[in-house]
Amino acid sequence: MEKYDIIEAAEQQFAREVTLGIIVTRPLTAWHYIIPGFFIIDYLRRGSAIRQFTKHYMYPRKLAMDSAEAQMRSGNLKTMEPELKDNLRRWLESQRLYYPDLVQAYVALIDMLRAHYLKLLEAEGDTYFLLIEHAYQHRDNFKDFIESISIAENEVDRLVIQQLGADGIVQEKIFAQQQQIAKRRQKMLEEVF
């Protein structure tokens, strides 16, 4: 369980860093200067945004981590697939985003994440970066993973935008998230290798 906890904590920290990166790039509004104490409202709003993004970001990753751990124990992946799709369906319905193509895109993303987490769980190391280093062994291998996972995430994002109806605000928010994720992953690549 120790490696599982290391991976989960690292993914949650990554989600927080992405959200903070988005918030920090926004310019201050006039309200910050006019209203005394507006920074408190901004601080509370920031905390809420971090919790919301982290929860959304972690849901498919938690499913993938749980299935990777179960696969390590039992070696049988097929028995988990119907439950995975059912959990995804319920989660997407609760988000008002249920769409069969979106479920399939998430399943593809979770399959990639499961393989990644399985590598990390089988690797030696007591930190997230050491797990990545031992699991991928070379910069190019990890870079290939980053590129393939980005393609899968972008497909999920495209379908979310399609489902929500090409709203400019949603598109802008998702684009900002994609930029921050790419920036953070590049930084991680440089730090690990």
Image (tube, helix red, strand yellow):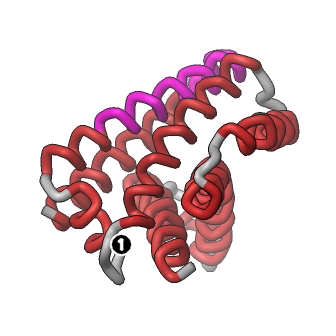
Query: Regarding mark 1 in the picture, which secondary structure is present there?
Result: helix
Is 111 colored magenta in this rendering? no
Q: Nearer the viewer, residue 9 or 23?
A: 9
Image quarter hosting the C terminus = bottom left
In the rendered view, would you say 152 is above or below 55? above
**Badge 1 is on which residue?**
128
The percent coordinates of residue 168 (x first, y second) are 57, 24
Image quarter hosting the N terminus = bottom right
The image quarter in which residue 62 lies: bottom right
Is 168 colored magenta in this rendering? yes
In the rendered view, would you say 93 is above or below 158? below
The percent coordinates of residue 77 (x first, y second) are 63, 43
Q: Nearer the viewer, residue 83 or 192?
A: 83
Magenta-colored segment: predominant secondary structure:
helix
Residue at 46 percent of width and 30 percent of height: 152
Residue at 28 percent of width and 60 percent of height: 135
The percent coordinates of residue 161 (x first, y second) are 61, 23
Residue at 53 percent of width and 67 percent of height: 12
The magenta region covers 147-169
Left or right position of 60 against 29: right
The percent coordinates of residue 124 (x first, y second) are 31, 74
